[in-house]
Image (spheres, rainbow, N blue to C red):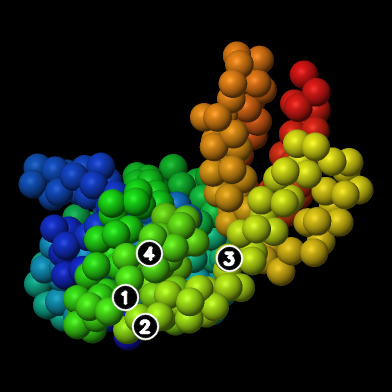
Amino acid sequence: MSSIGVRIKARGFQQIVGNKDTINKLIEAIKNNSLPSALVFHGPSGCGKTSLGICLAEELNIKTPNFFRYDAANTKGIDTAREIVDKAKSPSIFSGYKMFLIDETHQLRKDSQECLLTTVENASKEVIFVFCTTEPKNIIKTLWNRCIPFGVVTLNEHEMIEIITRAMASYQDNSLPYEAVELIIKLAEGVPREALNLYWKVIKKEDMNEIKRILAEQTKEIKAFKNLFNLALTGTWPDILKAYDSLELKDPEVLRRQALGYFTACMKNSSDYKKLWKFINIVDLFKEPFYSSGESGFLTALAKVIFKREE
């Protein structure tokens, strides 16, 4: 997937697919010379937070020696924070903006986040901090309050088609059936990184049966999800837990999006107002991400479905 990502990498805001509201706000801030010195890009994994930060650097014409990127998942200690503080204070090699892009900011230890507070608050106009996170609740409040948040969301069907179309064009791949594109989009659940991962597995394939076999594991998992959610509506708690324990993929955010899609479909197909109201209440259980609560948050929501179905 990494080679595909490089091939279709956006070189500026105009080339980014999706998240137009956030992009327009950033463009307007740059135009009005009101860009905040500290930003948080938050949202689901694989939806372009880091790419957005890199494109922001492109838009600001930040030279490579003035661009610093850190992965907090691997460099979460106080030494990393101190290094950022020192570099933020030191003179730039080139004139213009200096940017610090920190991936997985929520994984920075508390003392590391606290170390950044004064520097972030008192940064000069030429220094930009971009914090990327899937778990905004794990960023300490004092750091969060010094930043302006920008939400990054999953893509709609038309935007996902554009992502796959660009990938196919980059490889001159005219053989992939449209049915395969539709299947990839369905499995990816609006996450472009996942769509590119799936495309990489079937690149330049023509035989739809072969493509389906290659994607069989993902399709099998989708069926397991649907079985779990159907049990939540009809089965007992022990049966629900048994179905959950049998899942190979237990990522709470993936499960939440799948549950949201499943119960939304049930809501659309409700034949009377009583059922409609029931599913409105069930859908509400899965609208907010389980970034902080994780597995316990998802299982709690699933348990509440049992009570909602009886109302």
Indicate the amino acid at tag 2.
Lys
Circles 2 and 3 in contact, beta carbons < 8 Å: no
233 relative to 60, above or below: above
Q: Which dot marks residue 219?
A: 3
The kind of secondary structure element at disc 1 is loop
Q: Residue at x 19, y 82 (%)?
A: 172
86 or 228, which is in the foreground?
Answer: 228
Give the image quarter of residue 99.
Answer: bottom left
Q: Residues within 10 Å of mark 1 (few under 14, many from 20)?
A: some
- The percent position of residue 24, horizontal first and vertical second, equals 18, 45
Circles 2 and 1 in contact, beta carbons < 8 Å: yes
Q: Earlier in the sequence, mark 3 or mark 4?
A: 4
Residue indicated by mark 4: 179
- The percent position of residue 95, horizontal first and vertical second, equals 9, 72
Q: Which dot marks residue 176?
A: 1
Nearest to viewer (mark 3 / mark 4):
4
